[in-house]
Image (cartoon, rainbow, N blue to C red):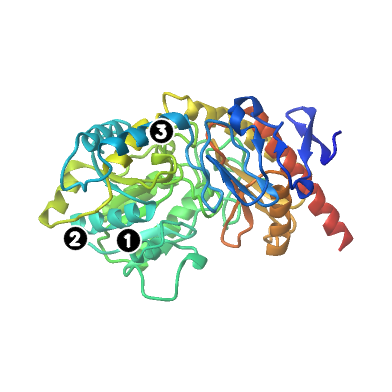
Amino acid sequence: MGQGQSEIIFAGSLNFSKFLLPDLQNWSEPAEYHFCSYGMIPPVLQTLIFKKRHIGRYIFSSLSLLIKNQHCHKSDWKCHFFLPHESRKVTAAAQKQFGRLGHTSNIYLHPGIQEYTEKLTSLLPGSLKVAYLTNSGTEANDLAVLIARVFTRNTDVIGLRGGYHGGSTYAMGITAIGRYKFGVGNGANCHSTMLPDVFRGPWGGSHCRDSPVQTIRKCSCSSGTCYAKDQYIEQFKDTLQTCVSKKVAAFIAEPIQGINGAIQFPKGFLKEAYQLVRERGGLCIADEVQTGFGRTGSHFWGFQGHGVIPDIVTMAKGIGNGFPMAAVVTTPEIAHSMTENLHFNTFGGNPVACAVGSAVAIEEDGLQKNCQEIGTYLLLEFAKLRDMFESVGDVRGKGLMIGIEMVKNKETCEPLPAEEMDQIWEDCKDMGLLIGKGGTHLQTFRVKPPMCITKDDADFAVAVFHEALIRHMKRTAEM
């Protein structure tokens, strides 16, 4: 081994593989990158400087490296990676449009907005053919709630506990994670109902999820039945009976909860919940900010995995590969209700955003298929670590939307303390792997890498996480 490197041996698939991981604390001078996807990095970027600075599209912090290849793009502060693909294509589209027309509001229609919205709505099923463009997921969800209230003439909105939908006054009301809610008035007539969490909730078994990996809880359900789903639906009915009026405006849910740690609902839950809401005159909103555009692998949209068609779909993040843009898509009938007054967004649908959105070609680049294949591989490898370590309570997700929930022990499932989570998190960072944290108690590691990652990248991530768990186990034994 060379100077400044340490060897890690881990179980990648059924064979043991070896990786030389950088000891980043010893790196203070420019050094060559010889790890995952090295051959795909443009030559000018193969020599990287490890200090607090940015180099092109690659982001670094002291003692950490965000490993990316030439197809991959930026992450936000939560380490939630945007949908990646050919960076030159997206950059060229933005530059070309800036050279023609940098900005005009959507009061003055330009060809780009029509071309883009037609392309976007063609990706959605049924009558979801009217798009309103905004700048962020928060704006999109805020507008979706407004549309639902205007159309239905009802006010009550229901969300799931653990759901995150943004930080505006409206969106904060439908968000149900305490650390994102300020102690001021927000979101009147917004209600939350029990989260159908088959790992941490009161009901769950070993066949509930649409995932390659199930919980370690036992299940005695016969084929075609799900006791956990039925019980969570009863709780949903109870919310409808006790917390809202006879008519509701909307129900909003992420197909897989993102910020809350890739929580998946029992199969069939969302379909029955949608039916109950529609019986009360409400609209169903799918928040696809994190699940959309192929990330779940099996489908282009997360809601398709539940066998439902929403009345309104919101999307952001991957829609523009990191560019500030978002969208609300609904039906012509619902959209028409907004014509009774004016609703305006200065930058939503600007020419550059539309050019960038049009250059995002998930289907053409095969990224959805990659999410399915590499995501399934990652889930199964992380599940092996769950079986090896007492601190790994649950592994879940679909495609490249993965959660790893950490516990003190598997018997009580008590969340791993924040200090220990931080130590594992920092160890991963120092070895070159950035992952997010989520969950009600910040007890879940969120793994949502660029959709272009390779099997070698996945093996590297599992190797690093394996080593971080070993270090945690040793620290625990010394306490």
Residue that mark 2 sits on? 153
Query: In 3D space, how far apart are the residues under numbered discs 3 and 1 (Cα atoms)?
Result: 37 Å
Front residue of 15 and 218: 15
The residue that appears at 34% across and 67% down in the rendered structure is 187
| Vertical position of residue 183 compared to residue 198: above or below | below
Could you give the CA–CA distance between mark 2 and mark 1, rounded to whole angstroms? Answer: 12 Å
On the rendered image, what quadrant is the C terminus found in? bottom right
Label 3 belongs to which residue? Answer: 90
Earlier sequence position, callout 2 versus callout 3: 3
Asked whether the viewer can see residue 116, the reply is yes
Q: Say which amino acid is labelled 1.
A: Val
| Label pair 3/1, CB-CB below 8 angstroms | no
**Tag 1 residue:** 157
Query: Looking at the picture, which amino acid does disc 2 mark?
Result: Arg
What amino acid type is highlighted by mark number 3?
Val
Helix, strand, or loop for circle 2?
loop
Q: Sequence-wise, which precedes: disc 3 or disc 1?
A: 3
